[in-house]
Image (cartoon, rainbow, N blue to C red):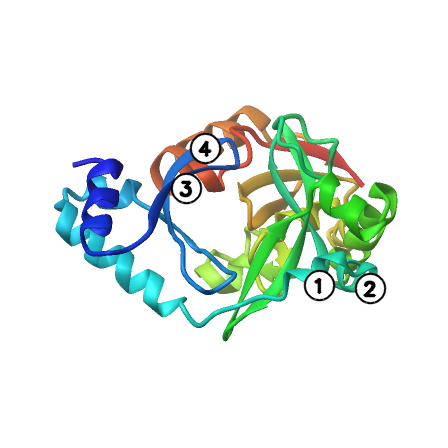
Amino acid sequence: MNRNDIIQELKNRGYHAEPQDVVKNGVLKEGIILRTSSNIAPTVYVDDFIKRGLSASEAADACIRIFESNNSISFDVNQLLSRTFLWKNCYLGLQKTSDENITKEATEYEGIEAYVYVRIDIGDGKGSIKITPDILKRANVSGSSILRHAKENTFKETKFVNLADMLGIPEEVIGFTCITNECQTKGASAILNKDALKSYGEKYGTHRIIAIPSSVHEWILIPYSEDMDIDMFTAMVREVNDAQVAPEEQLANRAYIIEV
């Protein structure tokens, strides 16, 4: 069973289904979209259905359930033409360095770039749209201004989470801290907040920090000491990525030492 089989099954049931390839953080995801009267056409990724060995009929059932749960959701796309809306709702996300045609900039972390996205209200939840140069042109917004506002909005939401409390780590592992945002989604960009990192360093009496990219949602910070082996932390990142983090949510296969 493959994506074409699922699409054909959906068409047999009278749905207008189309293939949709999406690159998420450098990972190609095979998806299906269903055209409806709503101006929101959610993409359902079928990779998991195929891996689980579902039949075309079972996968089509799953797609329909997802589509129907989103059928009443809509978004006024004209809001993307509003400078005020973009400035108020733009944030930074982090992903692997890419050739995507989106509004972005390089970071000091090798292999990682920062991009601008806008949060939107979708029903009872939140969605996001990556900002392209075309959107900025239509809204008459410059790339420098959207990046400035995205940084301001992002840094306001910086949040530290004490992992010793969360995971029951012994007290001697002092400073083992997660840096993310308030909603803990796409929060890895908090690592760009230099003032927050400086405050963290001052709290633990250090100007150097081990920074571990846990996922696109957060980083782990550890106060650096001379007896630490950065290669050990890099090996840990690779092991965790291989075993626990979905490819589209990985940032890098290494740890970093940063000065604050």
Q: Could you tell which of marks 2 and 1 lies nearer the N-terminus?
A: 1
* C-alpha distance separating marks 2 and 3: 36 Å
Mark number for residue 84? 2
Q: Residue at x 40, y 68 (%)?
A: 71
Are there few (<14), some (14-19), or many (20+) residues within 10 Å of tag 1?
few
Front-lying residue, 67 or 153: 67
Q: Could you tell which of marks 3 and 4 lies nearer the N-terminus?
A: 4
What residue is pinned by disc 4? 27
The answer to the question of whether label 2 and label 3 lie on touching residues, with beta carbons closer than 8 A, is no
Tell me residue 153's x, y (percent). 77, 59
What residue is pinned by disc 3? 245
* C-alpha distance separating marks 4 and 1: 29 Å
Q: Residue at x 53, y 36 (%)?
A: 25
Q: Residue at x 87, y 48 (%)?
A: 145
Badge 3 amino acid: Val
Mark number for residue 79? 1
Q: Quadrant of the C terminus?
A: top right
* C-alpha distance separating marks 4 and 2: 32 Å
Q: Quadrant of residue 167?
A: bottom left
User: In this rendering, does residue 203 appear at all?
Assistant: yes
Front-lying residue, 57 or 38: 38
Q: Could you tell which of marks 4 and 2 lies nearer the N-terminus?
A: 4
Q: Secondary structure at mark 3?
A: loop
Badge 1 amino acid: Gln
Tell me residue 220's x, y (percent). 58, 46
Q: How many marks?
A: 4
User: In this rendering, does residue 224 appear at all?
Assistant: no
* C-alpha distance separating marks 2 and 1: 9 Å
The answer to the question of whether label 3 and label 4 lie on touching residues, with beta carbons closer than 8 A, is no
Tell which tag, 2 or 3, sits nearer the viewer: 2
Are there few (<14), some (14-19), or many (20+) residues within 10 Å of tag 3?
some
Q: Quadrant of residue 27?
A: top left
